[in-house]
Amino acid sequence: MLPQDIVECVADLVSGIRSIDYVREISRFHRIQASPGFRGAIEYLKQEISKVSGAEVKLFEFPEDTTKDIETWESNYGWFPNHGVLSLLQPEQRILADFDSEPVSLIGQSCSADIETDVVYVGKGFRPEDFQGKEIAGKIVLAEGRASNVHKAACIERGAAGILLFQAPSGIQEVPDLRPYAALWPRPGEAQKTRFGFALTYSDGMKIKQWLEENKRVTVRANVDARLGVGKAEAVSALIKGTELSDEVWLVAHICHPHPSANDNASGSATLLEALRVISRMMREGKIPQPSLSIRFLWVPEWSGMTKMLHYAKETVAKCRFMVNADMVGADPSKTGSVLHLFRTPYSLPTTLNNVVRFWLATEVKRKMKHMSASGRTPLPWEYNVYSGGSDHVLLASKASGIPAVMLNQWPEPFWHTSADVPENLSCNQLEFVARVVVLTAVSLGLPSRTMKELVLTDCRNEAVEIIHDVGMKAVRELSACADNPETLYKRYLKWLDLALQLGQASIDSASHEWPLIEEQEALKQGLKASLDMTYTAEMVVVRRAYEGACAEAGLEPKDETHFETGSGSFNKEARRLIKYALNPGYMMKDPDIMLRFTGLQETDRQLFERIDEILNLCADWRSLDDVYEHVCLEFGLYNPSLFTEIVRDLERMKVIETREV
């Protein structure tokens, strides 16, 4: 996709050793948003940027004003922790947590306290049944749920003095001294009601739980010196200016999270530093010219920073043409079992960006590794996946912003949001692999004159073919198995094939405004669209034959396509979004009933909020819910219509959308 001399130069210059050194430095800071530790990490970044590049550095500072919301997004309090110790008094005497020794042990946004009291176990700690028959006022509760939910239910609503959290047993890789990373995230107006919390090790949490189940009295003393106040959301930008100052490629990482949080997210921040170093050196040495599009490296506090960029830095955001979010990217697969995922843009936002990043992942994973680790040269697994939320790229990838944005992220990550997320669990080879991909992607997008647009177009067509074939295969499988009424299945898959074709055509067409195509490349684009039409036609024939076979098995007469309408036709409503920006998932949890329902749904539907994102993307204007439902099912799989109706009703209840009968 780029000249081979550029590709080899990138391979020679990118250093996984430099990347992991950056991780070690960043992970020294306790980087809670709007805290002194976060400011320390910002200063470190500014110093390192000046050492490796002549890029234009800018510090964006936005007020964390808790009296002003940005639609569904609330501001965070500034947090100023000094001290925190939790001592066990009975049935044993020892220190359970100490902020000075292990900063993650004091839950974020904890406030000052000096109290000696008993501990009460409350299970998950946010459902009404968790507190039934238990007196917790003035006590400290032990819980296994999400800190913010437990704190609200136990402290704010029921008068508990504080909370203790430990990671609930999962039966997989239980680590005795592992502590969860947690934060209270008090909402605006709750500062005076905010209490404190400590994160216990897994072994201490289980032991205290056992004592309480044996009816033993557990008494602790909590001494905390910390306060909430007015803070700032700060973001650091390093801009390599292009010849076209109105267009930018954004490479984004998150500088936040507690000490150490090496993979989440120091690895992404380190990857951006290394990418900046390499691109700057290539330009200095004449290996590449000044890019056409400017390349902006942006380190933000996750969610809050990007929200405020969108709202307060509109002129800067308006220049963004593409965004790559380097999230958790450095874990050693041999130690963690992690797989690197490229999460593409939602289907509602067709783009060739997906294909550029995917191309470089597929190419660079084959390159011989430079470093031998204790486990040898472990393969670097990666996958290409449908859209996923979970990070702030969703704010750009939403229909309202319309900026193609993808995420690089590793999962599963057994040490995610725990004290065991340390640099020792990262891999030089993994970091080097991702840094090469990020550099090559940035150069491809920033220097379109050097990029082989024919490859971009062809890869885009090939992905569309994959999606159409996948729909066809699912249709054949279900029709062959007589999984449902043949007519129901046939109607469904005819509709999905139509939608898959539309997605493919739109993705190929996006190249015309994303790349400077010459006449011959435009002709190739039309040829690729024609080839996609042929794939669609062939797949329609395959599905038709499978339908006829299913009808024969069921003793039915197959109908001609003209004799029935495709689609479900069951909702009889249209919907339209009422918010401009992407939805804050936490906003839905403000309603107690919705919180309980959504918490339960997430246990079985890991893509709940991705479905919600797409519902909102597809409803930029009035749109049939039948059409929205089919699009969402194509992207994320068949969904229970009743659950879909409930989600729409909840969104309407929270004034995120409005609906009307049709």
Image (cartoon, helix red, strand yellow):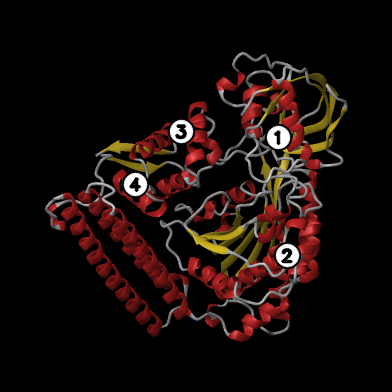
Mark 4 or mark 2, earlier in chain: 2
Q: Which residue is mark 3?
A: 654
Mark 3 or mark 2, earlier in chain: 2
Left or right placement of residue 226 versus residue 625 in this view: right
Left or right placement of residue 286 versus residue 41 in this view: left
Q: Residues within 10 Å of mark 4 (few under 14, many from 20)?
A: many
Asked which secondary structure carries label 1, the reply is loop
Residue 356 percent coordinates (x, y)? 52, 71
Q: Residue at x 52, y 34 (%)?
A: 599
CA distance for labels 2 and 1: 31 Å
| Relative height, residue 19 to residue 132 (above, below) | below
CA distance for labels 4 and 3: 20 Å
Q: Which residue is mark 2?
A: 375
Mark 1 or mark 4, earlier in chain: 1
Q: Nearer the viewer, residue 432 or 628?
A: 432
Q: In the rendered image, which quarter is residue 51 located in?
A: bottom right
Left or right placement of residue 177 versus residue 327 in this view: right
Q: In the rendered image, which quarter is residue 145 located in?
A: top right
CA distance for labels 1 and 3: 32 Å
Asked which secondary structure carries label 2, the reply is loop
Q: Residues within 10 Å of mark 3 (few under 14, many from 20)?
A: some
Residue 213 percent coordinates (x, y)? 69, 21
Q: Name the amino acid type tagged 1.
A: Phe
Residue 359 percent coordinates (x, y)? 52, 72
Front disc: 3 or 2: 2
Mark 2 or mark 1, earlier in chain: 1
| Relative height, residue 544 to residue 412 (above, below) | below
Q: Residues within 10 Å of mark 1 (few under 14, many from 20)?
A: many
Which label was assigned to residue 166?
Answer: 1
Q: Residue at x 47, y 37 (%)?
A: 601
